[in-house]
Amino acid sequence: MWRCVIIAMNDSQEPFTLPVLAAGLVHEVKNPLSAIHLHLQLLENQVLQVEDEELRAQMKRRVEIIKREILGLNQTLQEFIRLIRSETRAIAAAGLNEIVEQVVQLLGPQAGRNQIRLETNTGAVPDHLQMDASFLKQTLVNLILNSIQAYETVDDNRDRLIVVTTGTENGRFFLRVEDNGAGILPEDREKIFEPFFTTKVHGSGLGLSLVRKMMMEMGGHVDLVSSPGKGTRFTLYFDGAVKALPEPAEIQGHEAV
Ligand SMILES: Nc1ncnc2c1ncn2[C@@H]1O[C@H](COP(=O)(O)OP(=O)(O)OP(=O)(O)O)[C@@H](O)[C@H]1O
Ligand SMILES: [Mg+2]
């Protein structure tokens, strides 16, 4: 069993920041895309003036295809932007475990189809904490899907089990997803957090890099324990990651706002 703790680094220590790269990419792609779209519209009008009927029909068809592809690209960009931007809406501590249960219910059938039991073990959450609901959902979906996929290469008849645990350790809220799937090779343990690193045929390799990016935004760190062939455990510790609301005692000690 090997152990690795990835500390979420601050921006200056981080060799890349996904939001900056993403914003740059979106900007670089969007501007030429709208110029192409504009000129295509002009071309569309000019095509109407072509006298040869067959050529005109042919050109019109090609313009239509280009237009459809441009709109498709634009749609992809919009989805990418939505993925990168996290909602800022905070949820109170009381709702954290409910969200965990919701996500587990959502992915339960998928786990079931793969003969995997998906269980929760929700514990106490400090009641002065607030967290971004979309962050929690996205992160949990990414981690649980990875755990489900971790059985794709397992061909023995082990009892397949994924457990999602929440709780508080030394005053820190944690969220843990543990499986007894394929595990992660020691040489891959750093790489799995890099964007586009994947060992799957249809993986994009963006799941864990987003988890790390979101953890960095909120503070906190990811603890990874994995044993090749035996299983993996990801624990997210929300050190400074949760917005602490003032304790009632603190409010009493200050002037009311
Ligand atoms: N629970 C796990 N068990 C085993 N390997 C894992 C686990 N979680 C992640 N990995 C490894 O980390 C790699 C990167 O994971 P990540 O979620 O970033 O991308 P992905 O799952 O390959 O693709 P996607 O973008 O669709 O999520 C995976 O390809 C896999 O090799
Ligand atoms: Mg993934």
Image: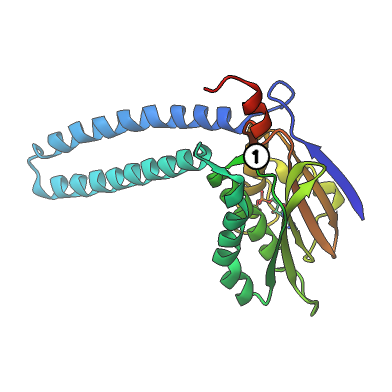
Q: Quadrant of residue 248?
A: top right
Q: Residue furthest bottom?
A: 157
The kind of residue tagged 1 is: His
- Res. 204 in view: no
Give how far across and how far down residue 17 sits, in percent.
63, 29
27 lies left or right of 185: left
Coordinates of residue 241 in the picture (x, y in percent)? 67, 36
Q: Is residue 136 left or right of residue 76?
A: right
**Which residue is located at x 46 percent, y 38 percent?**
81
How is this picture coloured? Answer: rainbow
State whether residue 23 is above or below residue 155.
above
Residue for point 62% across, 38% down: 214
Give the quadrant of the N terminus: bottom right
- Residue at screen point 57% across, 59% down: 103
* Label 1 beta carbon within 8 A of ligand 1: no
- In depth, the one of 187 and 251 nearer the eye is 251
Q: Position of residue 185 (x, y in %)?
A: 83, 54
Q: Is residue 19 left or right of residue 219?
A: left
Q: Nearer the viewer, residue 2 or 188?
A: 2
Q: Tag 1, which secondary structure?
A: loop
**Ligand 2 position by quadrant:** bottom right
Where is residue 76 shown, x and y percent of the image? 42, 45
**Count the marks: how many?**
1
Is residue 196 at least partly visible in the picture? yes
Label 1: few (<14), some (14–19) or many (≥20) C-alpha neighbours in 10 Å: some
Q: What residue do we see at 10% from left, 40% from top?
A: 48
Q: Is residue 241 above or below residue 233?
A: above
Residue located beneath label 1 in the image = 128
Q: Examine the image and state in which quarter residue 244 appears.
A: top right
